Amino acid sequence: MGYRRPDRLHAAGLVVSVIGTDGREAGPFDFSLAPAHGRTRQQLIAAFAVATAPDGRWRSAETMHTAYRTAVAFLRSLDRLDISISSLSDFGPEQWWAWRSDQESRNRWPGSVNIMRVLLKDAPEVGALTRRALSQRTHKPRKRLYESYSVEEFDAIRRRAGELVRACEARISANVAVLERYRDGRDDDEPMLPYDGTRKSRGALLEQLVQEGRLRFGRGGARQAAAALGTAKLHPTYALFPTRGELLSIMTALVCDRGYNLSTLQSLTVPDLASEYGGDEVLVAHLDKPRRGSQRFFTNSFTGPHARTLRSALTITAPARECLEHLGHATDQLLIAGTSSGVTDHPTTIFITGGFTHGNAVRQWDQVADLRNSDESGLLHLHFGRLRLTEQVINRKSSQNSPAVSEDVYRRPDRLTARLHRDVILEGQAEAVEHATHTVRLQYGPVNDLGLPIETAHALGAGQLDTAASACLDFTHSPFAPAGEPCTASFLMCLACSNAVATPTHLPRLVLLSEALDNLASVAPDRFNARYREHRERLEDLLDTSTTKAERTAARDAATDGDRAMIERLLNRGLDT
């Protein structure tokens, strides 16, 4: 009774606080760094507050931060673009198109434009004409600036990521075992290490690490502790926590397994165990894709090798979640890295929970992985977009997108698809040729080129074997009638008969028949589809492969009234017996 939700705007009205769906502060978002432009800044802040409200369209902290940076950049760009406004009511279609064109000239991806479309639509001050301009949607570029990895490069990245994940898991698991022995009081034989003016066992050091999140050593102590805790050249802090680079290896393995994009990886939480004790492990991951609206939350099941990858991620990051709970920042987020340098925007200054690919992290992973391009031209660069594309191309199925998007946007435009499917394509072409061979049996050519016996060739040349639009070499041995009996099939079936031939003399009637079938298709499509489509396709294939356009034009000009009457009788079934 009497509860009132706290005001999300600070006293001066320039800072917005947002509590995310995880109950944590996603901001604060300070707009005081941006120029005011009269009331424009305050109006944008109000629109931002609407879009990030509990019932707003933006839910993830990452999206909110991107929108905040875009809004600040928008305000800063107005002077540069000579857009002089004191309120969003002054922001007309011309100004919108000027700003949008500037953005599109700088970045082919439409992210910033779409964000400002959302913000400006939530601002009631924006006029009707400008709203009409805002309704003109932007689209992602159809052509990517990158192609998929080769199969060999993809396999090398997957294999190397697996090696780095296993090495990290072995280090952390070994230290977790030492910590558990310490908690059980079974570390009496442990060697003592110097720390902060005292001496502690490995278990005691690890207990302090999991409680506080960091170990601080004087001169020389860190090197001795690193040797004892198995962190080698890494700071002893990483005895229980993965580095950012090791977390990138986990992400790489998950992309290779499931084709996740970065936002999906960021949303991963601790999976549920869905299998019974003693059976094959089944893990269920809960995913969040905000752009799906009411269907944004869904699950994926992991079994076999994929479950082992997810189990490794769970094992590696479990001590970090325990430490965060001790520090008052409990979370069920799956992907968490440690940092001994304090370079992070997390309130603990100890852990990294987002922006894993920022800075020079991926380039450093390239150096550690030490993989070469297929052509040995240099280091193979880890690119999560390429990795996700390659996973779909190689596995020939959609991953976190619809089958149509996977086929049309990801797989079909990529050259690797054609290389991988070369055998399938060649087999399909062979089947097409075989189908054409079986369905278009009529032979076409000059009489002397058909390889006929002399008497048959003479009869054909004299027109003695003619039918409605072609000629028949054996009227009593038709594939459409019992042997020895006269053929009673429609003359259109001559196009599919091995006994049928046609010469340039027959071309006028064949061209007239083609045009008549086209006319029938336009005026009586149902009748055409039911009776004539297959015949039209056979005839079209015959004319396209056996004659030239010039020959068909000359044949049409040479057609007589008798030829036209014959074709009309044929289609009106006046020749049927």
Image (spheres, rainbow, N blue to C red):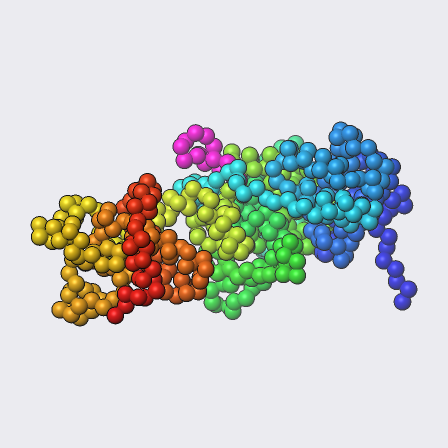
Quadrant of the frame with the N terminus: bottom right
Residue drawn 60% across the image and 61% down it: 298
Question: Residue 163 at what x, y percent from top left?
Answer: 47, 45
Residue drawn 78% across the image and 50% down it: 122
Question: Quick check: can you spot residue 128?
Answer: yes
| Residue that protrudes farthest toward the left in the picture | 454
Residue drawn 32% across the image and 40% down it: 550
Is 266 covered by the magenta stretch?
no
Quadrant of the frame with the C terminus: bottom left
| Residue that protrudes farthest toward the front in the picture | 561
Residue 528 drawn above or below residue 348: below
**The quarter of the displayed image where residue 499 is located:** bottom left
Most common secondary structure along the magenta stretch: loop
Question: Quick check: can you spot residue 227?
Answer: no
Residue drawn 78% across the image and 36% down it: 75
Is 370 covered by the magenta stretch?
yes
Question: Residue 131 at what x, y percent from top left?
Answer: 75, 47
How many numbered marks appear? 0
Residue placed most toward the observer, 302 or 100: 100
Q: What's the magenta region?
A: 369-384
Image-based side of 290 in relation to 467, left or right: right
**The quarter of the displayed image where residue 363 is located:** top right
Image-based side of 439 in relation to 243, left or right: left
Image-based side of 477 in relation to 351, left or right: left
Question: Residue 500 at what x, y percent from top left?
Answer: 21, 57
Question: Residue 405 at what x, y percent from top left?
Answer: 52, 52
Residue placed most toward the observer, 409 or 62: 409
Residue placed most toward the observer, 334 or 457: 457
